Amino acid sequence: MDSDNAGGGAPSILNGRKPNILYLWLGDKIFTTVVVMLGASIIMLALGMAWVLFDEGSLSLREYGFINFIKGKTWDPAVQLVFGAWPFIFGTVITSTMALLIAFFPALAVAIFSAEYAPPWLSGIIDNLVQLIAAIPSVVIGIWGIFVLAPWLRDTVYMPIYLWTELNQPGLLPILGNPIGYGMATATIVLALMIVPYTTALAKDAIKSVPKDQREASWALGSTRWEVIRMAVLPYARGGITAGAILSLGRAIGETMAVAMLIGNKNTLPFSIFGAGATMPSVIVNEFREAVESLHLSSLMAIGFVLFIIALIVNLTAAYINRKLSIGGGQIL
Amino acid sequence: MNKILGLLPVLVLSLIMISCGGSDDPDRTPVRDRVTILGAGATFPAPLITAMADDYRDITNRRVTVNYQSIGSGGGIRQFMEQTVMFGMSEAFLSEEVMTNIENSTGGRAFNLPITLADVVPTYNLPGIGKGLVFSGELLVDIFLGKITRWDDASIAALNPGVNLPRTNITVVHRSDGSGTTNVFTSYLSRVSDEWRNQVGFATSVNWPTGIGGNGNEGVAGAVINTPGAIGYNSFTYALLNNMSYGSVINSSGNIIEPSFEATTEASNIELPDDTRILFTNTPAEFGYPIAGFAWMLVYENLDQNNAIQTRGEAEELIRFLIWSILDGQELAEALGFARIPAAAIEKNIQMIRQMKWQGQEIGLELLQSQNLL
Amino acid sequence: MRRRRIHDKIIEILLVIATIAVLLPLIIIIFHVIVEGVSALNYEFFTEELGSPSRAIQGRPTGLVHTILGTIVVDMLALAIAVPIGIGAGMMLSEYPEHMLNPTLRIMNDTLNGMPAILKGLFAFVLIVKPMGTFSGLAGGVALSFVMLPIIARATESALLSIPWTIREAGLALGIPRWRVVISAVMPAAKTGLATGLLLAFARAAGEAAPLLFTSFGNNYLPDRWFGFIFNPVDTLPQRLYSLAISPYSEWHSMGWAAAIVLLVMVILAFAFARFVTRGKVQLK
């Protein structure tokens, strides 16, 4: 902008210039209007997207009804032309919650270590590296998953488990599923890796926001470092940490490319642990390109609409928890 | 706002890079004469179409660029209907419903021009047994329905006397993503078996009764190559390219057909309707390979009605490319692992091109005449 | 007390192990990408167009010059759209905390952030591609800006909130109008946070293939004219990487890995750049 002295020169603005009413009043008026318009445009954008999804998905939602569409267990674009979203909702819920379960404690550990234990220089490096994980493009993680991770997991993890189970607990085989490498387990592991940075960053923010006197009181009681963290810091920060975890869950729910490249893409229940599955974003990516029937296409859009609603619920929950659970600060949302 | 200024170097750098990029782009044709023909659709014929595009660009001294993006057959049909592409490409012809819609909205027909042939072969992994295992349609149906589960099953042995079939379990591998390959394969299975047609049907993606899914041609190939006892299906090109074992298939005339370009072309050597919209999996042709079908280029009759085509010049270039690709362009086919379209299909294509118009003017006819093709 | 000390030490070791476990995949991924991709990363990669797969199979010159240039154009367009709107929205959240739209804005922003990118691409398809009648770099930029927007807005909000209110109060007390305080005092003080917001938004969007599939669409060649980068279909790295990765040719797989190197370098350069402008203090969220 036309700032004459950008840095801390605010007082110098007054020098030699008499502020007039236009400068004061109109400037603020314009500024407010512009800022509010820009903010409102994001709301419009989100609502516009929901509307487009609903509109394009309305054919399917009318055909089945919203509830029956969600409950529908069959997704058959070939013979019956029946479309139910349940397999994908199920796949999304399982993969993302499992991913969060896997990611949560390591991520929290990193946050605690970085915030409370590591010296500032190391803490800086750790933070940067963790955030670099978030910066790795999901297609890069996808190509790595296809050519490196999935074959490795198949040969060194899935196959031994599968063979052991085959010998000892053959009854469990249907639950394990076929260990081809591309499936629910691989997708979950990759998802966990991808949400760690979010969980870590949000948890660290929450920990950092714990006031000093809170810790000092605990120190004064002669607690060890871990006891301070466990008794004073974590309870105070749990609202922020939980909200952060739920927001990370939201990230996992929406993750598309890496999952689509690794989950194996199977549209029929039941899913198994190693076997192929599908999530809402992955089925959209895979079938959007091939859908010709308008009901098929519309059903994919309707899944997008369901996804919008789920994302909305997740974010509302995180906001609510953050407000209810934080004893003091926990400025996340 | 200083932050935005901070990005300036990046912007400047990118502009420099862009202008540098220009220096290694020899301007053989003045920019204003250049034309880009945008097409999209089926993945299977993409290597052929893009190789045609490479050649055509050289032939025209970079004047005409054909930008073909493989987005899948369904995507090809839809973008053609949305009029965002000048031509679509599909391994399934346009349905009656789509044809009628287009006729109502553009006042002309949509043409399906066969440009190449898609052929699908059963691929398998049986250590010690190379290519050439014989399958019948019924046998493939039973295997992919999960009814036959062992390689030493009597029905496999009956077709392959003298082959020492192992006692291995059969692992069925299928595509898990939507694919034209699946469409051709399942359409064949539906043709030979009512049970398959009623239970699974045919489409770019179906609900498989058994087996494991592989993502893409390479996903299937990878699973087949890594799993002894596996059977899958791949496009013939892909099986050749990756040295996979593939089987021969008994066709409707009872002949054992080993997959080959000639056998695939032969499969389409049947009575073609004028609009070439015909599915000939399980072909009646005596020596035709039975798991094969056309890949069609989709073009509007009234080219001016397609929003993606702005000028008559673009429409003419599109027609010139069409003519080139069904004649000279076919020379590229075999080297790339594709079968040529038969003479009958070329003839039908020319008849369709002849009817293409720009604002009522018969530019298809004019261009064919100028090349002495009529 | 001794037992508690040991306990404390064990916890610390566990934390270190967890940290290493989280960072290990990062190193493995970068290692693999470099090892697999470096062989395809030759001079031609940066100077030739892709063309058909037979070029790569027959060893004729082929590369991704059009893809790299297209990526730069599309990303810059996306930043140009997303930065003003995102920063504006962030300002609204932080500078007008009492505004009645804020709770809605916050939820909608987070919801938008949680939406799969392919739906943003679809939205851009409906907004831009259909009316324009063709795929274009512009449509790709708009789609990517939808990816960037919520990240920039949120980062701006937290960056501006991290500036003590006393600065604003001091400015206002001097009779300086609010807009001037925000632009001349708060924004400069928050530049670290703002830069990192842009950076993370860029990094997130730079890797998204899904929104580009039906917007910028792809192109095997350079556009036939320079403004074709904006108004015609263009190639972008993530979308090309995806199609190279799922192609059946090992030559194209190597090119895909090489494209992954370029993408990673872009992202890491953005990191280094942000470190530079913020004098070495990068703190992301």
Image (cartoon, coloured by chain):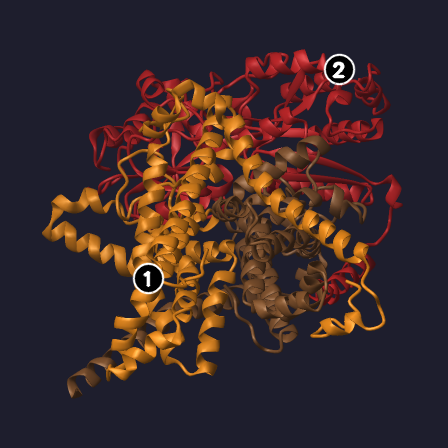
Figure chain in brown: C
Q: Tell me residue B213's x, y (percent).
A: 36, 40
Chain containing mark 1: A
Figure chain in orange: A
Q: Is residue C215 visible?
A: yes
Q: Tell me residue B62's x, y (percent).
A: 80, 45
Left or right of B135? Residue B38 is: right
Crowd band around label 1 with a 10 angstrom C-alpha radius: few (<14), some (14–19), many (20+)? many
Q: Which residue is mark 2?
A: B355
Mark 1 and mark 2, same subunit? no
Instruction: Write the residue at 57% across / 12% down.
Output: B271
Chain containing mark 2: B
At label 1, the amino acid type is Arg
At label 2, the amino acid type is Gln
Q: Quadrant of residue B115?
A: top right
- Element marked by disc 2: loop
Looking at the image, residue C224 lies above or below residue C258: above
Q: Quadrant of residue A199?
A: bottom left
Q: Tell me residue A259's x, y (percent).
A: 42, 48
Q: Between tags 1 and 2, which lies in front?
A: 1
Q: Which residue is mark 1?
A: A238
Give the spatial CA distance, label 1 vs label 2: 72 Å
Looking at the image, residue C21 lies above or below residue B18: below
- Element marked by disc 1: helix
Count the numbered circles shown.
2
Q: Is residue B287 visible?
A: no
Figure chain in red: B
| Residue at the extreme bottom of the image, as rendered | C2
Left or right of B4? Residue C154 is: left
Left or right of A116? Residue C267 is: right
